[in-house]
Image (cartoon, rainbow, N blue to C red):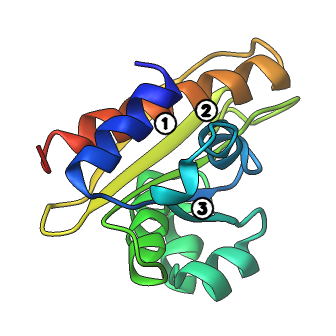
Amino acid sequence: MTAADLLNRAKACGVMIATAESCTGGMVAAALTDIPGSSAVVDRGFVTYTNAAKQDMLGVLADTLAAHGAVSEEVAGEMAEGALRHSQAQLAVSITGIAGPGGSEFKPEGRVCFGLAATGQQTQVETVEFGAQGRDAVRRAARDHALTLLARGLSHFA
């Protein structure tokens, strides 16, 4: 599904979308807002690159960050839920990961955690291992996966 198709479906369902992005730095919001008429569907995007920004803008708990680290499903879930709470949206996606270069034995380059929160639904989280394919490729793959998650999330509103 293209970003334009996603926006058309969201508009038909009367759903507003918010994004909460770390390693993609706003690429999901940009992909959506590149489409004319996106203001009917895209409420806002949060770029929360630092832990402080995740806490200040989205309400991610310091305890969650300390216990699991920024690149975790727990933080991705809190980011998505925070994007819903701090917006007028009914559907939010979040991304936090290691785009590279670098990483560690426990959190390798290419690991990206996603959250999907929707009004009245249980928040979904998942981790995708894109591999060490380079920063640009990981970021593009994460953006595309987030758009797929948003499309999946719209099925709850159809």
Residue at 33%, 48% (x, y): give it.
11
Mark 3 or 1: in front is: 1
Residue reaching furthest to the right: 101
Give the residue at mark 1.
146
Q: Position of residue 106 (x, y in %)?
A: 61, 38
Q: Position of residue 67 (x, y in %)?
A: 51, 70
Relative to 16, is 136 above or below? above
Give the residue at mark 2.
143
Q: Position of residue 137 (x, y in %)?
A: 75, 17
Relative to 89, is 70 above or below? above
Give whichever of discs 3 and 1 has the lower sequence position. 3
Give the residue at mark 3.
69
Q: At label 3, which amino acid type do we have? A: Gly
Residue at 30%, 37% (x, y): give it.
9
Left or right placement of residue 62 versus residue 34 in this view: left
Alpha carbon separation for disc pair 2 and 1: 5 Å
Left or right placement of residue 19 versus residue 98 in this view: left
- Regarding residue 109, the answer to whether it shows in the image is no
Q: Are marks 2 and 1 in contact (CB under 8 Å)?
A: yes
Give whichever of discs 2 and 3 has the lower sequence position. 3
Q: At label 1, which amino acid type do we have? A: Ala
